[in-house]
Image (spheres, rainbow, N blue to C red):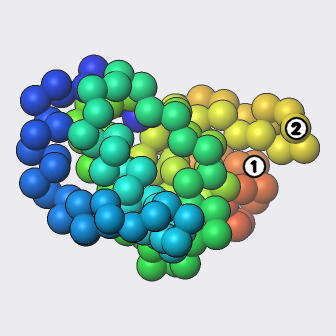
Amino acid sequence: MGGHHDQTYPARSAARHGRARRLRSLIAGTMSGGAQQRVANGRALTSTADLLLRDAPSLGLTPIVVQQDFAARAGIRATGLTGIMVEQNARASLKLADRGDLIGAGRIVGHGTASALSESSDVQAAFLGGSTVKTE
Protein backbone atom coordinates (compact mmCIF):
# COMPACT_ATOMS: atom_id res chain seq x y z
CA MET A 1 0.00 0.00 0.00
CA GLY A 2 2.86 2.45 -0.06
CA GLY A 3 6.43 3.23 0.79
CA HIS A 4 8.10 4.75 3.82
CA HIS A 5 5.83 6.37 6.41
CA ASP A 6 6.02 10.17 6.70
CA GLN A 7 7.22 10.69 10.29
CA THR A 8 5.71 14.18 10.46
CA TYR A 9 2.21 12.91 9.72
CA PRO A 10 1.11 11.81 13.24
CA ALA A 11 0.77 15.38 14.55
CA ARG A 12 -1.23 16.46 11.49
CA SER A 13 -3.35 13.33 11.65
CA ALA A 14 -4.50 13.82 15.22
CA ALA A 15 -6.04 17.16 14.32
CA ARG A 16 -7.90 15.64 11.34
CA HIS A 17 -9.60 12.77 13.12
CA GLY A 18 -12.07 14.43 15.47
CA ARG A 19 -14.53 11.53 15.34
CA ALA A 20 -11.90 9.05 16.46
CA ARG A 21 -10.76 11.46 19.18
CA ARG A 22 -14.35 11.71 20.51
CA LEU A 23 -14.36 7.91 20.88
CA ARG A 24 -11.46 8.00 23.37
CA SER A 25 -13.73 7.97 26.41
CA LEU A 26 -15.71 4.91 25.27
CA ILE A 27 -14.94 1.35 26.28
CA ALA A 28 -13.87 -0.59 23.17
CA GLY A 29 -16.42 -3.36 23.69
CA THR A 30 -19.27 -0.84 23.61
CA MET A 31 -18.32 0.66 20.23
CA SER A 32 -19.95 -0.26 16.94
CA GLY A 33 -17.81 -2.00 14.33
CA GLY A 34 -17.55 1.25 12.40
CA ALA A 35 -16.40 3.15 15.48
CA GLN A 36 -13.80 0.47 16.18
CA GLN A 37 -12.50 0.80 12.61
CA ARG A 38 -12.25 4.60 12.95
CA VAL A 39 -10.23 4.16 16.13
CA ALA A 40 -7.99 1.59 14.38
CA ASN A 41 -7.46 3.97 11.46
CA GLY A 42 -6.69 6.85 13.80
CA ARG A 43 -4.19 4.74 15.73
CA ALA A 44 -2.52 3.71 12.49
CA LEU A 45 -2.24 7.31 11.34
CA THR A 46 -0.83 8.57 14.63
CA SER A 47 1.72 5.80 15.08
CA THR A 48 5.26 5.81 13.82
CA ALA A 49 4.98 2.27 12.48
CA ASP A 50 6.47 1.45 9.09
CA LEU A 51 4.01 -1.38 8.36
CA LEU A 52 0.27 -1.71 8.94
CA LEU A 53 -1.30 -5.19 8.97
CA ARG A 54 -5.10 -5.47 8.74
CA ASP A 55 -7.16 -8.65 8.76
CA ALA A 56 -10.68 -8.40 7.31
CA PRO A 57 -11.19 -4.78 8.41
CA SER A 58 -14.57 -4.42 6.70
CA LEU A 59 -16.05 -7.67 8.04
CA GLY A 60 -19.43 -7.03 9.66
CA LEU A 61 -19.59 -3.34 8.80
CA THR A 62 -22.51 -1.63 7.09
CA PRO A 63 -21.95 -0.62 3.43
CA ILE A 64 -21.65 3.09 4.28
CA VAL A 65 -19.07 2.39 6.99
CA VAL A 66 -17.15 0.13 4.58
CA GLN A 67 -17.10 3.00 2.08
CA GLN A 68 -15.84 5.39 4.77
CA ASP A 69 -13.23 2.87 5.88
CA PHE A 70 -11.89 2.42 2.35
CA ALA A 71 -11.66 6.22 2.05
CA ALA A 72 -9.66 6.25 5.29
CA ARG A 73 -7.42 3.48 3.93
CA ALA A 74 -6.72 5.64 0.89
CA GLY A 75 -5.68 8.40 3.27
CA ILE A 76 -3.42 6.00 5.15
CA ARG A 77 -1.90 4.86 1.85
CA ALA A 78 -1.25 8.49 0.87
CA THR A 79 0.96 8.93 3.95
CA GLY A 80 3.40 6.40 2.53
CA LEU A 81 2.70 3.82 5.23
CA THR A 82 3.18 0.32 3.84
CA GLY A 83 0.18 -1.93 4.40
CA ILE A 84 -0.71 -5.58 4.10
CA MET A 85 -4.41 -6.29 4.14
CA VAL A 86 -6.50 -9.45 4.09
CA GLU A 87 -9.86 -8.37 2.71
CA GLN A 88 -12.87 -10.05 1.11
CA ASN A 89 -13.88 -6.95 -0.85
CA ALA A 90 -11.53 -7.67 -3.76
CA ARG A 91 -12.86 -4.93 -6.04
CA ALA A 92 -12.29 -2.09 -3.54
CA SER A 93 -9.02 -3.59 -2.31
CA LEU A 94 -7.52 -3.84 -5.79
CA LYS A 95 -8.34 -0.16 -6.37
CA LEU A 96 -6.09 0.71 -3.40
CA ALA A 97 -3.36 -1.86 -3.87
CA ASP A 98 -0.18 -1.90 -5.89
CA ARG A 99 -0.08 -5.70 -5.88
CA GLY A 100 -2.39 -8.49 -4.81
CA ASP A 101 -2.57 -12.16 -4.01
CA LEU A 102 -5.94 -13.88 -4.38
CA ILE A 103 -6.76 -16.87 -2.21
CA GLY A 104 -9.43 -19.45 -2.98
CA ALA A 105 -10.03 -22.67 -1.07
CA GLY A 106 -6.91 -22.04 1.00
CA ARG A 107 -4.57 -21.67 -1.98
CA ILE A 108 -3.11 -18.72 -3.83
CA VAL A 109 -5.02 -18.69 -7.10
CA GLY A 110 -3.80 -15.39 -8.48
CA HIS A 111 -1.09 -12.84 -7.90
CA GLY A 112 0.32 -9.83 -9.66
CA THR A 113 -0.18 -6.12 -10.02
CA ALA A 114 -3.55 -4.81 -8.92
CA SER A 115 -4.29 -3.52 -12.41
CA ALA A 116 -3.46 -6.86 -14.05
CA LEU A 117 -5.62 -8.74 -11.54
CA SER A 118 -8.50 -6.30 -12.02
CA GLU A 119 -8.38 -6.76 -15.79
CA SER A 120 -8.13 -10.57 -15.75
CA SER A 121 -11.35 -12.22 -16.95
CA ASP A 122 -10.70 -15.19 -14.63
CA VAL A 123 -10.32 -12.89 -11.63
CA GLN A 124 -13.38 -10.89 -12.65
CA ALA A 125 -15.47 -14.06 -12.88
CA ALA A 126 -14.24 -15.57 -9.61
CA PHE A 127 -13.74 -12.54 -7.35
CA LEU A 128 -15.27 -9.42 -8.87
CA GLY A 129 -18.80 -10.50 -9.69
CA GLY A 130 -18.45 -11.14 -13.39
CA SER A 131 -16.81 -9.59 -16.36
CA THR A 132 -16.55 -5.99 -17.37
CA VAL A 133 -16.92 -4.70 -20.90
CA LYS A 134 -13.72 -3.28 -22.35
CA THR A 135 -13.90 -0.56 -24.96
CA GLU A 136 -11.22 -0.35 -27.61
User: Considering the image in quadrants, where does the N terminus appear?
Assistant: top left
Mark 2 surroundings within 10 Å by alpha-carbon count, few (fewer than 14), some (14 through 19), many (20 or more): few
Q: Nearer the viewer, residue 43 or 68?
A: 43
Please tell me which residue is depicted at 66% across the width and 34% down the height of the picture.
101
Q: Which mark is residue 122?
A: 1
Report the number of discs: 2
Residue 22 locus on image (x, y percent)? 25, 68
Displayed quadrant of residue 8: top left
Residue 8 versus residue 136: which sits nearer the camera?
8
Query: Can you give x and y, in whole percent of width and height, for residue 17 in the image?
Result: 20, 59
Residue corresponding to mark 2:
106
For the residue marked with disc 2, what is the amino acid?
Gly
- N-terminal-most mark, 2 or 1: 2
Please give left or right for residue 67 compared with residue 89 in the image: left
> Residue at point 32% right, 65% down?
25
Q: Residue at x 9, y 44 (%)?
A: 12
Q: Find the distance from the CA under tag 2 to the CA under tag 1.
A: 17 Å
Occupied quadrant, residue 46? top left
In front here: 96 or 131?
Answer: 96
Instruction: Tell me whether the residue at label 2 lies in contact with that at label 1, contact meaning CB atoms closer than 8 angstroms.
Output: no
Q: Secondary structure at mark 2?
A: loop
The x, y position of residue 122, in whole percent, is: 75, 49
Is residue 130 in view? yes
Is residue 135 shown to the viewer in this render? no
Q: Secondary structure at mark 1?
A: helix
Judge the density around disc 1: few (<14), some (14-19), many (≥20) Cα neighbours within 10 Å: some
Closer to us: 65 or 91? 65
Amino acid type of the residue that numbered disc 1 sits on in the rendered structure: Asp
Q: Residue at x 34, y 25 (%)?
A: 49
**Side of 106 relative to 48 (left or right):** right
